[in-house]
Amino acid sequence: MSINFKIYRIFVLKYYFTTLLIINIQLDFIIS
């Protein structure tokens, strides 16, 4: 169960960081 939680947390972190990256890229496009 703890292993599943670790995997879940890793996926959530990946999703969170990729979302932040996409938002930053879109903001760069809007600014320029």
Image (tube, rainbow, N blue to C red):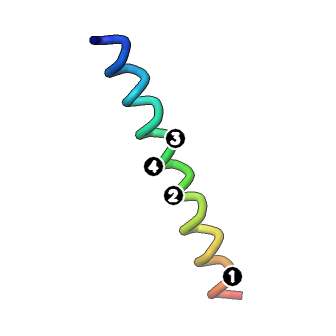
**Residue kind at label 1, given as amino acid type:** Phe
From the image, which quarter does the N terminus lie in? top left
Q: Are marks 4 and 3 in contact (CB under 8 Å)?
A: yes
Residue under label 4, please give it: 16
- Whole-angstrom CA distance, mark 4 to mark 3, is 5 Å
- Contact (Cβ within 8 Å) of mark 2 with mark 3: no
Say whether disc 3 or disc 1 marks the residue closer to the N-terminus.
3
* The C terminus, quarter of image: bottom right
Element type at marker 2? Answer: helix
Q: Position of residue 25 (x, y in %)?
A: 65, 69
Residue at image location 51% in from the left, 40% down from the top: 14
Q: Secondary structure at mark 4?
A: helix
Q: Which residue is mark 3?
A: 14
**What x and y, as percent, mark residue 3?**
37, 12
Vertical placement of residue 1 versus 6, above or below: above
Q: Single out the mark in the foreground, 1 or 2.
A: 2
- Is label 1 in contact with label 4 (beta carbons under 8 Å)? no
Question: Residue 21 appears at what percent x and percent y?
Answer: 59, 58
Q: Is residue 26 left or right of residue 10?
A: right
Q: Tell me if label 3 and label 1 are in contact, CB under 8 Å.
A: no
Mark 3 residue type: Lys
| Residue extending farthest left | 1
Q: Is residue 12 above or below residue 3?
A: below
Q: How many marks?
A: 4
Badge 3 element: helix
Q: Quadrant of residue 22?
A: bottom right
Q: Could you say which disc has been placed on residue 29 in the image?
A: 1
* Quarter where residue 4 is shown: top left
